[in-house]
Image (cartoon, grey):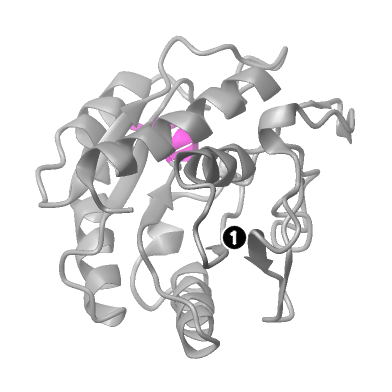
């Protein structure tokens, strides 16, 4: 979700497609210091600080939502929380990444926002060994349930992305887990077949645009926007 679009050999090419341009005053992000600011790519630059961030799907998603409702009176607020290369165990309730996610979401609400959906794109690390891959579905489902509980929103829409690639040989096992989640208001868009970076793992910039627009389409089709 943090996005490595345009990152090759640890360097981002700086290319921002028109679908990801900033819209000052209309698309905001909650920065690492918990203050709102105008959003721009790389969306996770001060969040996923141990890796080089390029473009992810977030800005394409927000711009697609704006195109659907250009006269909307309130800004779209993005709350970036992703950490690249993290496994599902690191996002379990009580863990460091989970605690930070919940804290940032609560700050967003306290400062005037309303949480309308969670966008979830994770799992490449969990394809490395069979134990992680086979336990992924249960852990992912519990994460969604716990998050809804802690945010006091039992039917909070979750739109997840089914993997296009992975770090190990059990990609299809994790994909089956993702596609098999049957919780209410959990929707899945599929990244399989989208263009990858030369590393064969991360999505390219055009693919990140596609994922962002797919996420927006899923929300709009579900009337959760």
Q: Residue 215: percent from the left, percent from the top?
A: 41, 37
Q: Quadrant of residue 95?
A: bottom left
**Left or right of residue 193, residue 152 in this image:** left
Q: Position of residue 209 (x, y in %)?
A: 59, 27
Q: Residues within 10 Å of mark 1 (few under 14, many from 20)?
A: many
Q: Residue at x 59, y 28 (%)?
A: 208
On screen, residue 150 versus residue 1, left or right, reads left
Quick one: 67 or 38, which is closer to the camera? 67
Rendered view: 148 above or below 2? below
- Whether 123 is drawn above or below 24: the answer is above
Rendering coords of residue 142 (x, y %) = 20, 61
- Count of marks overlaid on the render: 1
Comparing 31 with 9, the one in front is 31
> Against 36, is 92 above or below?
above
Q: Can you identify the residue that label 1 sits on?
A: 80
Could you say which is closer to the camera, residue 217 or residue 151? 217
Q: Residue at x 14, y 34 (%)?
A: 180
Choose between 171 and 147: the one closer to the eye: 147
The residue lying at 46 percent from left, 82 percent from top is: 109
- Screen quadrant of the N terminus: top right
Asked if residue 126 is among those painted magenta in the image, a careful observer would answer yes
Which SS does the magenta portion mostly show? helix
Is residue 77 visible in the rendered image? The answer is yes
- Decide if residue 43 is on the left or right side of residue 217: right
| Identity of the residue drawn at 67% across and 81% down | 34
Q: Name the side, left or right, on which 150 lies relative to 102.
A: left
Can I make out residue 5 in this image?
Answer: no
Which picture quadrant has residue 83? bottom right
In the rendered image, residue 105, in percent from the top left (x then y), is placed at: 47, 75
Q: Residue furthest bottom?
A: 110
Q: Is residue 61 magenta?
A: no
Q: Which residues are magenta?
A: 123-130
């Amino acid at each position: 979700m943090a996005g490595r679009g345009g990152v090759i050999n640890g360097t981002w090419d700086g290319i921002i497609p028109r679908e990801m341009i900033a819209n000052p005053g209309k698309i905001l992000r909650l920065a690492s210091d918990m203050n709102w600011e105008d959003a721009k790519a790389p969306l996770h630059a001060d969040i996923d600080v141990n890796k080089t961030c390029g473009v992810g799907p977030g800005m394409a998603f927000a711009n697609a939502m704006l195109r659907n409702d250009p006269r909307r009176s309130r800004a779209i607020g993005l709350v970036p929380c992703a950490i690249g290369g993290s496994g599902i165990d690191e996002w379990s309730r009580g863990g460091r990444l989970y605690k930070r996610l919940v804290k940032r979401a609560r700050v967003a609400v306290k400062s005037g926002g309303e949480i309308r959906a969670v966008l979830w794109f994770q799992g490449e690390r969990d394809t490395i060994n069979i134990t992680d891959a086979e336990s992924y579905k249960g852990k992912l489902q519990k994460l969604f349930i716990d998050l809804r509980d802690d945010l006091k929103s039992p039917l909070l829409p979750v739109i997840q992305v089914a993997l296009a690639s992975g770090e190990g040989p059990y990609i299809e096992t994790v994909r089956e887990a993702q596609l098999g989640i049957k919780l209410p208001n959990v929707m899945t868009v599929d990244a399989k077949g989208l263009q990858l970076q030369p590393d064969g793992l991360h999505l390219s910039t055009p693919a990140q645009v596609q994922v962002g627009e797919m996420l927006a389409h899923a929300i709009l089709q579900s009337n959760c926007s």
